[in-house]
Image (spheres, rainbow, N blue to C red):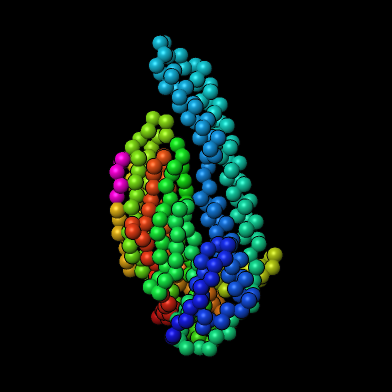
C-alpha cells in the first residue's frame, strides 16, 4: 500500500501518522490517552528508590564509618546503633515509595478510556501502521525523517554522587480491520513483527569513588508486542489485551568502574517477541497491535553517560499475522 504520512507535535513529543488510516477524533484521543498513560508508567518506573536526601544520609554515614576506622581503639558501638537505625529507616522509606508507585499505576490504568473504531477499505491481511510516538531521555532529541525515526544526544550525570534512571524509544500502533482478518483452519495465529535499528551507542562509567561508590553506565534494549482490542471494563471502556510478549534483548551495554568508554553498534534487523492468539479471543471489531522499542539507561556517579554515537535510527514495518496449522 502507498503510505502518506503526516507529522505533528504534542506535549509528549513528535507524532507521525499514516494519512491513509483515517483515524477518527475519538480514536486519536484514545491513542493519545493510552500513550500518556504509557509515559506516566515509564516515569514511575524511572523513579529511584533513593531520594537525594536518602543518598546524602548514606554518604554521611560512610564518612562516619571511615572516620571511625581511623580512630585509635576503633569503638564501633555507637556507630553500629546509627547504622542499624539508618537501615531500618531506609527500609521504611523504600517500602513507602514502592507503595506509592503501586497506587500511581492503579490510578493511571483506571483512567484509560475507549474510543470508536475505524473503518478502512480492505487491501491485505497486514497490520497497517497507524501512528508512532517517541520519547527521549534528558539532553536528547528525535526527528521523524523519510528513512525512519532518528535519535541523537544522550543523558549524563552532572551532579556529584548523582544517579539516573531514564529511557528513550518509541511506541508504534498498527490496526487490522475485521474485513481484512485472515482465516485459519486451527483458529491459531502467529504475530511476529520485526524492526530495524541502526547506528550506535557509547557509554562511559567512571572509576569507583570512595563517596559515590560504583561508577556505572548501562543501556538495555527492551522490546514489547501487545495485541489488543477496545472493550468495556468495570469502570468503563478500556483496551483489552489479547496477547503480549515483552522482555530485554541480548543487546546491551554494561560498564562498571572502568574509567573508560565503550561503543556498541545497534543490532540492525531485530525480531520483536512473537505472540500467538486464537480467533475465538477476537471480537468482530478492529484488532490493534503495539510495538515498543525502548532503550533503558542507568547511570551512577558524576560523569557517567550513555550517548547516541553518532545517532540511533529506528524503523518499524508492517506485517501480517500468520495462520498456524
Can you say which quadrant of the picture contains the C terminus? Answer: bottom left
Vertical relation: 312 (above or below) 183: above
Q: Does any portion of residue 148 appear in the rendered image?
A: yes
Instruction: Write the start and end of the magenta stretch as one range.
Output: 258-262
Residue 133 screen position, x and y as percent: 50, 67
Name of the residue lying farthest toward the right: 235
Query: What type of secondary structure mainly makes up the magenta span?
Result: strand
- Quadrant (top left/top right/bottom left/bottom right) for the N terminus: bottom left
Q: Residue at x 47, y 22 (%)?
A: 64
Instruction: Residue at 37% x, 57% y: name it.
Output: 308
Give coordinates of residue 18: x percent, y percent.
Answer: 50, 78
Which of the 4 quarters of the picture holds residue 26? bottom right
The answer to whether residue 279 shows anywhere in this view is no
Q: Position of residue 134 (x, y in %)?
A: 48, 64
Relative to 25, residue 67 above or below: above
Q: Which residue is drawn at 49% across and 60% down?
A: 135
Q: Vertical placement of 72 versus 45: above or below?
A: above
| Residue 39 on the magenta span | no
Amino acid at each position: 500500500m502507498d503510505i502518506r504520512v503526516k507529522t505533528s507535535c504534542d506535549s509528549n513529543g513528535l507524532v507521525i501518522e499514516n494519512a491513509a488510516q483515517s483515524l477518527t477524533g475519538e480514536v486519536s484521543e484514545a491513542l493519545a490517552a493510552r500513550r500518556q498513560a504509557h509515559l506516566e508508567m515509564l516515569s514511575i518506573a524511572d523513579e529511584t528508590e533513593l531520594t537525594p536526601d536518602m543518598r546524602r544520609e548514606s554518604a554521611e554515614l560512610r564518612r562516619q564509618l571511615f572516620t571511625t576506622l581511623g580512630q585509635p581503639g576503633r569503638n564501633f558501638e555507637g556507630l553500629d546503633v546509627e547504622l542499624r537505625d539508618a537501615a531500618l529507616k531506609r527500609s521504611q522509606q523504600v517500602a513507602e515509595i514502592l507503595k506509592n508507585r503501586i497506587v500511581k499505576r492503579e490510578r493511571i490504568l483506571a483512567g484509560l478510556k475507549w474510543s470508536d473504531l475505524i473503518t478502512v477499505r480492505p487491501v491485505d491481511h497486514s497490520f497497517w501502521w497507524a501512528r508512532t510516538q517517541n520519547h527521549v531521555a534528558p539532553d536528547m532529541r528525535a526527528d521523524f525523517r523519510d528513512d525512519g525515526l532518528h535519535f541523537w544526544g544522550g543523558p549524563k550525570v552532572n551532579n556529584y554522587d548523582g544517579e539516573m534512571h531514564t529511557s528513550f524509544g518509541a511506541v508504534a500502533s498498527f490496526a487490522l480491520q475485521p474485513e481484512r482478518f485472515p482465516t485459519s483452519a486451527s483458529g491459531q495465529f502467529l504475530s511476529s513483527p520485526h524492526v530495524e535499528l541502526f547506528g550506535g551507542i557509547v557509554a562511559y562509567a567512571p572509576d569507583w569513588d570512595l563517596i559515590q561508590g560504583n561508577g556505572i553506565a548501562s543501556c538495555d534494549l527492551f522490546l514489547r508486542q501487545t495485541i489488543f482490542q477496545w472493550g468495556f471494563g468495570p469502570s468503563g471502556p478500556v483496551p483489552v489485551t489479547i496477547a503480549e510478549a515483552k522482555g530485554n534483548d541480548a543487546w546491551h551495554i554494561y560498564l562498571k568502574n572502568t574509567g573508560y568508554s565503550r561503543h556498541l553498534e545497534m543490532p540492525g534487523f531485530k525480531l520483536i517477541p512473537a505472540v500467538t492468539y486464537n480467533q475465538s479471543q477476537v471480537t468482530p471489531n478492529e484488532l490493534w497491535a503495539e510495538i515498543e522499542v525502548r532503550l533503558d539507561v542507568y547511570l551512577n556517579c558524576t560523569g557517567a553517560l550513555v550517548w547516541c554515537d553518532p545517532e540511533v535510527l529506528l524503523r518499524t514495518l508492517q506485517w501480517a499475522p500468520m495462520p498456524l496449522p
